[in-house]
């Protein structure tokens, strides 16, 4: 009797422990995969942000250098137009190049020949003989004395040397003055924007690898450990990578499985991978501690039960067996009451306690779950039965009032309707996460059959709130609350793509006038308030027609979309400028100032128009206003 009793008790407890471990394993596996996916996404976003930041820096540097190079070329032309005796003296040209801080100076006559310059071996070269030099002949053909050409960095025609050339038309005669530069700064900046360079500066955890694959050809363009290796694993294949956009386990060529996350960026796929055995090690480490706790509890329970059976089972065992038989048959309301001596009374009390513990198994499972430290709750019921098996955490995780919880747990139909009503509307962008109330979210996994339902509930409020915070910070400017420039461009492309065919949209580039004087006079705190006031006026524009963003510093941009014609676009701009006048900024206790801003806009009726090109045109119109009038707006006019 004693051995049989202990054997069945062992089976029951072991089964409960295995169920708990299985639930814990499922949760932990999903949680680890979600955490790894989120971690990879953050790192991939950091790589993309670094690429975009480096590209923006390179673009700004090139614009500044182009303007500087053009100024030096015009200075060389100015000197040569007034000192014609320098034309055939190479030494003087070299001296002029040194004064202008350029590497080469050349003079090209009306026939397209280099007739003099600082590099003797280039003299006599026919500019028409090579594609690189031929571009400058357009200056001669234009006949415009203000014509110029800033050529992109490329190998020169004479010796394949990487150079950047700028040519300007001569004013005193037909010809060209050309200056050349070794583009050291551009090349250094471009080298910092390579994938391999970024990966060398990017921290990775043990076993992680990051790589970039061409989205069309499938060629591996960069890898965190370099390109001196073979890329034969399945997770370098394009079809496999596209399947891992939401995270996927992919088998490699050596038979080992890796967890891969891929993100599409421009014309490439930026990917991250982690060997599956590392994730298994982490999983076993997390589940192992729970297993040890459960085994310890099982051992303690078995020892106690063995003691009770050994000490308390004496005469009258058959009566006890009869009661136990009734209990085994499912009559858990049976009360064992064997009297006559102290031993039987204690045995009856122990059995009754054990029966109650089985009935209240949910409480014990809840205690075990609490020991694991995991915000987890579970429920189970058979449709049509009277009682719902729930752990104590269900009520707290679902925010069910005490009075309502009692009735729900005693009626499976009520509980079934309650849980399915909650699961009708998932949280935005999710499939298994639901809002219990404002700022409280749970993940519900359910396994259902025709008669039986098993569910696991976990609290994911912190994960959801952190994800929302990160999404907001990634897309909004911290000072003004406006969209960041990169996110603005994405939204603008979407608005343009979905614009009705009968309407027009415009992008507007804005720049605050005299902002530096305000900063210098009243301090940066007032300057920040000045920017915030300007942003609040932008945000007051109708959201159904206007997108707003901060580009950088005192530069802003808007998109006015879904308008009937350009006149309506101008009406919105008039409303905006009128609002600026009506909302001055308090600079001090005695001084208020109306915000002045210059802007330029470019509009289109083409849903396939290039947003970057529109922004560039609007920028050109803005700078025209800045040069001529300030404090107003102008439309871009295509010359």
Image (cartoon, rainbow, N blue to C red):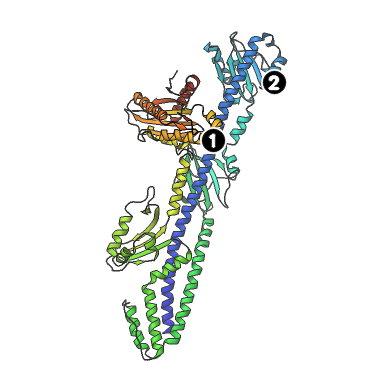
Residue 355 point in image, percent of width and height: 37, 77
Q: Residue 525 versus residue 293: which sits nearer the camera?
A: 525
Q: Quadrant of the C terminus?
A: top left
Q: Residue at x 57, y 36 (%)?
A: 193
Q: Residue at x 44, y 61 (%)?
A: 375
- Examine the image and state in which quarter residue 455 appears: bottom left
Q: Are marks 2 and 1 in contact (CB under 8 Å)?
A: no
Residue 88 point in image, percent of width and height: 69, 11
- Examine the image and state in which quarter residue 461 appears: bottom left
Residue 185 point in image, percent of width and height: 62, 30
Hey, which residue is sitting farthest front in the picture? 590
Q: Residue 10 versus residue 346: which sits nearer the camera?
A: 346
Q: Is residue 329 above or below residue 383?
A: below
Q: Which residue is mark 1?
A: 524
Q: Is residue 146 above or below residue 583?
A: above
Q: Which residue is mark 2?
A: 98
In space, the residues marked 2 and 1 are separated at their CA atoms by 41 Å
**Disc on the earlier residue, 2 or 1:** 2
Instruction: Say left or right for 467 vs 544.
Output: right
User: Dot 1, how many residues are within 10 Å of its Cα: few (below 14), some (14-19), or many (20+)?
Assistant: few
Q: Quadrant of the N terminus?
A: bottom left
Residue 6 point in image, percent of width and height: 43, 80
Find numbered disc 2 in the image and state the secondary structure of the residue it sits on: helix
Let me know if residue 114 appears in the view: no
């Amino acid at each position: 009797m004693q051995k049989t009793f202990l054997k069945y008790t062992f089976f029951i407890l072991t089964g409960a422990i295995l169920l708990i471990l299985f639930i814990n394993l499922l949760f932990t596996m999903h949680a680890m995969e979600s955490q790894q996916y989120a971690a990879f996404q953050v790192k991939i976003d950091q790589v993309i942000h670094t690429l975009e930041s480096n590209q923006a820096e390179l673009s700004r540097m090139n614009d500044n250098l182009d303007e500087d190079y053009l100024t030096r070329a015009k200075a060389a032309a100015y000197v040569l137009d007034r000192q014609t005796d320098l034309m055939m003296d190479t030494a003087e040209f070299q001296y002029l190049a040194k004064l202008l801080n350029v590497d080469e100076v050349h003079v090209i006559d009306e026939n397209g020949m280099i007739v003099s310059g600082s590099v003797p071996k280039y003299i006599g070269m026919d500019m028409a003989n090579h594609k690189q030099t031929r571009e400058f002949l357009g200056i001669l053909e234009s006949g415009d004395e203000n014509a110029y050409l800033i050529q992109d960095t490329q190998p020169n025609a004479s010796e394949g040397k990487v150079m950047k050339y700028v040519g300007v038309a001569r004013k005193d005669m037909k010809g060209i003055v050309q200056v050349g530069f070794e583009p050291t700064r551009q090349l250094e900046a471009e080298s910092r924007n390579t994938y391999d360079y970024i990966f060398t500066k990017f921290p990775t955890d043990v076993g992680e690898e990051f790589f970039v694959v061409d989205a069309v050809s499938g060629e591996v363009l960069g890898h965190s450990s370099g390109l001196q290796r073979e890329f034969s694993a399945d997770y370098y294949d394009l079809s496999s990578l596209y399947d891992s956009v939401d995270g996927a386990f992919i088998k490699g060529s050596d038979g080992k499985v890796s967890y891969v996350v891929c993100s599409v960026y421009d014309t490439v796929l930026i990917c991250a991978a982690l060997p599956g055995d590392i994730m298994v090690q982490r999983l076993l480490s997390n589940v192992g501690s729970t297993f040890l706790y459960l085994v310890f509890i099982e051992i303690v329970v078995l020892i106690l039960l063995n003691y009770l059976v050994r000490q308390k089972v004496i005469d009258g065992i058959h009566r006890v067996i009869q009661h136990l038989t009734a209990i085994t048959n499912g009559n858990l309301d049976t009360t064992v009451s064997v009297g006559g001596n102290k031993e039987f009374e204690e045995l009856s009390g122990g059995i009754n306690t054990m029966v109650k513990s089985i009935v209240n198994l949910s409480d014990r499972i809840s205690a075990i779950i609490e020991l694991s430290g995991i915000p987890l709750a579970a429920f189970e019921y058979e449709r049509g039965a009277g009682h719902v098996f729930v752990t104590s955490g269900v009520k707290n995780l679902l925010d069910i009032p005490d009075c309502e919880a009692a009735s729900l747990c005693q009626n499976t139909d009520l509980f079934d309707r309650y849980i399915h009503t909650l699961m009708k509307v998932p949280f935005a962008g999710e499939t298994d996460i639901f809002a219990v109330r404002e700022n409280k979210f749970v993940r519900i996994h359910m396994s259902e059959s025709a008669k039986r339902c098993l569910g696991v509930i976990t609290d994911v409020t912190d994960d959801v709130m952190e994800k929302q915070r990160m999404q907001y910070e990634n897309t909004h400017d911290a000072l003004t609350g406006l969209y960041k420039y990169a996110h603005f461009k994405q939204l603008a492309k979407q608005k343009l793509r979905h614009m009705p065919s009968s309407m027009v949209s415009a992008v507007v580039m804005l720049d605050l006038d005299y902002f530096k004087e305000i900063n210098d006079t009243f301090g940066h705190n007032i300057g920040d308030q000045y920017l915030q006031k300007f942003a609040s006026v932008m945000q007051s524009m109708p959201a159904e027609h206007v997108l707003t963003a901060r580009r950088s510093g005192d530069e802003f941009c808007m998109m006015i979309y879904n308008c009937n014609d350009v006149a309506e676009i101008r009406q919105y701009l008039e409303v905006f400028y009128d609002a600026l006048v009506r909302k001055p900024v308090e600079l001090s206790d005695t001084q208020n100032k109306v915000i002045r801003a210059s802007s330029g806009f470019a509009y289109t009726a083409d849903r396939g128009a290039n947003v970057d090109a529109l922004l560039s045109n609007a920028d050109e119109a803005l700078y025209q206003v800045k040069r001529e009038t300030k404090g107003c707006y102008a439309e871009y006019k295509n010359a």
